[in-house]
Image (cartoon, grey):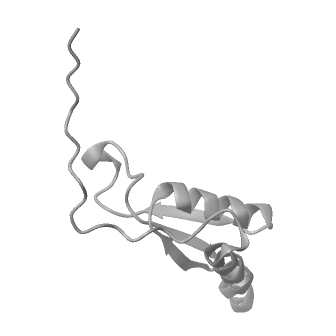
């Protein structure tokens, strides 16, 4: 039987929420390269709603024992210490794209 201290040490806790799946995958890869197990949970309505959850936020979970180190790694990524950067602010009214019709 596992002791209470060991069980608490193995608990899975929420580290942070990434704005989308590509960033979550990059952050998780950085954590895994550092020897930290990272689990992702997509947000939004789920994959069945629009066939993909790539544009929805993703929660990143780690073991409690790795939380402090993982937090520092993600913080370094967000501050320009790695390949991942803070996402640009979204425009309230994005420009509309009109289809181009080509004639010969």
Residue at position x 21%, y 33% in the image = 99
Up/down of 3 relative to 48, above or below: below
Q: Residue furthest front?
A: 104
> x and y percent of residue 48 in the render?
29, 46
| Residue 20 occupies quadrant | bottom left
The x, y position of residue 86, in whole percent, is 53, 72
Report the side of 82 relative to 44 (left or right).
Answer: right
Kindly indicate the quadrant of the structure image that contains residue 73: bottom right
Residue with the most extreme bottom position: 5
68 on left or right of 19: right
Q: Position of residue 23 (x, y in %)?
A: 54, 60
Q: Nearer the viewer, residue 12 or 35?
A: 35
- On the question of residue 14 being in view, the answer is yes
The image shows residue 64, relative to residue 34, as above or below, that is: below
Image quarter where the C terminus lies is top left
| Residue 2 shows in the view | no
Residue closest to the eye, 15 or 56: 56
- Nearest the viewer among 97 and 36 is 97
Instruction: Tell me if residue 56 comes above or below residue 10 in the rendering.
Output: above
At horizontal 58% and vertical 57% (from top left) the residue drawn is 25
Instruction: Judge left or right: residue 65 versus residue 42.
Output: right
- Identified at 44% across, 67% down, the residue is 19
At 20% from the left and 23% from the top, the residue drawn is 101
> As displayed, is residue 22 above or below residue 77?
above
| Foreground residue among 84 and 18 | 84
């Amino acid at each position: 039987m596992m002791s209470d201290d060991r069980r608490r040490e193995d608990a899975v806790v929420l580290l942070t929420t990434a704005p989308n799946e590509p960033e979550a995958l990059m952050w998780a890869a950085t954590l895994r390269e550092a020897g930290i197990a990272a689990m992702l949970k997509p947000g939004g309505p789920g994959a069945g709603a629009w066939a993909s959850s790539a544009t929805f936020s993703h929660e990143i979970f780690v073991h409690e024992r790795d939380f402090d180190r993982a937090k520092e790694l993600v913080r370094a990524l967000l501050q320009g210490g790695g390949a991942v950067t803070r996402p640009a602010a979204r425009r309230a009214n994005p420009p509309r794209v009109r289809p181009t019709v080509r004639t010969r």
